[in-house]
Image (spheres, coloured by chain):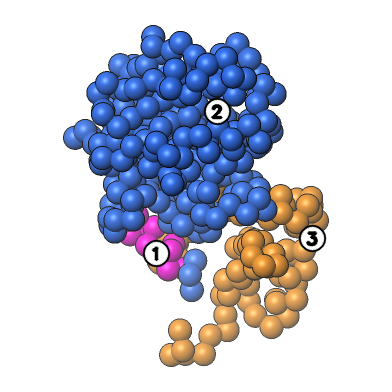
Amino acid sequence: MDRRLALAYRNRSGEIARRRLKFLLTADKTGFSPETLEMLREDICRAVSKYMDVDPGQIEMRVRNGLLPVLYAAIPIKGPFVRGTI
Amino acid sequence: MSEVIVITSGKGGVGKTTTSANIGTGLAILGKRTVMIDTDIGLRNLDVVMGLENRIVYNLVDVVEGNCRMKQALIRDKRYPNLYLLPSAQTRDKSAVNPEQMIKLIDDLQEEFDYILLDCPAGIEQGFKNAVAGAGRALVVTTPEVSAIRDADRIVGLLENGEMKSIHLIINRVRADMVRRGDMMSVDDVMDILAVPLLGAVPEDEAIVISTNQGEPLAGTDTPAGQAYLDICRRLLGEDVPLSLPNVSYGFFGRLAGLLRRA
């Protein structure tokens, strides 16, 4: 049930704006085209999928400013979980 | 010595001028000698928002070109004893002034004022460069919209490259009802994306439209936006005013999604 509620929230326009922005700013900062970023995302997804169950649609990437720009990827995992650790 | 603050945004129409007018008014209410400078040459507006448009004789370009003395161009706001406006020129363009001239102009005001506020034009060209040249501190105004935040991010990058010492964010036109039902990015969302410390959030408030119609800034009045602006001014002075975010209560869905996002 929780998952379905979260899914409903993810489709609200505020959440769509947030996801679009993260993608857009990453594209702006790396100079990569959206297609290239999509390829990068798919490659990350493929690599992680060998070990864990992940939803490709939920991966978020972003570049943060700092001393050196850093690429972050947030990859929600569906499993496997070890019971009692999460 | 005064603190020199530029109010900028990148995108037009997010409320730079309204923010400048209200922060200027708020600082004056709090007893600080404040001058607001409209640096949008060719498209001046701060005079109108302040309701001082009928009192303009000389302008910023006149001062820079030596057509008048600084004192002749400064308009004193009779409603607040500490508040002055240096209006922009309407019949010239951005190239009428360069960054060195702006720095000199600001230097000439340092003695007289505690705070010098620079209302920056939209865009990242000459006008932006002029406005940020003499500033030690920047307030980046944005709204919770994709286009405004994208431009704000670009501006933050430019300010950081230009070694601006202090950069803060003001999130304007937040609608708590829309955030609650998930149809507007929350203050937290915007802060998370831009990674710049927040100075304040201003709720969408129809009192702003009325205040602009009348040419009377509403900082300090008993309205949601008026209080938000006064809080922002107190924080500028270093007071520890808790953020009364108009939209921290995301509701159940928002909190849940937040948990999932952070997990």
Mark 3: amino acid: Met
Q: Quadrant of residue A64?
A: bottom right
State the residue in front, B83 or B93. Answer: B83
Q: Which residue is mark 3?
A: A39
Q: Colour of chain B?
A: blue
Which chain is in orange here?
A
Q: Which residue is mark 1?
A: B256
Q: Which numbered disc flags the more N-terminal residue, 2 or 1?
A: 2
Q: Position of residue B250 (x, y in %)?
A: 34, 55
Identify which residue is drawn at 53% across, 85% down: A81
Residue count near mark 2 (Cα–Cα under 10 Å), binned few <14, some 14–19, many ≥20 = many
State the residue in front, A65 or B186. Answer: A65
Residue count near mark 3 (Cα–Cα under 10 Å), binned few <14, some 14–19, many ≥20 = few
Q: Main secondary structure of the magenta part?
A: helix
Q: Which residue is mark 2?
A: B39
Marks 1/3: CA–CA distance: 30 Å
Q: Chain letter for mark 1, please.
A: B
Mark 1: amino acid: Leu
Dot 2 and dot 3 residues touching (CB under 8 Å): no
Identify which residue is drawn at 43% across, 31% down: B36
**Magenta region: which residues?**
B248-260
Marker disc for residue B24: none
Q: Residues at marks 2 and 1, common chain? A: yes
Q: Position of residue B128 (x, y in %)?
A: 62, 35
Closer to the observer: label 2 or label 1? 2
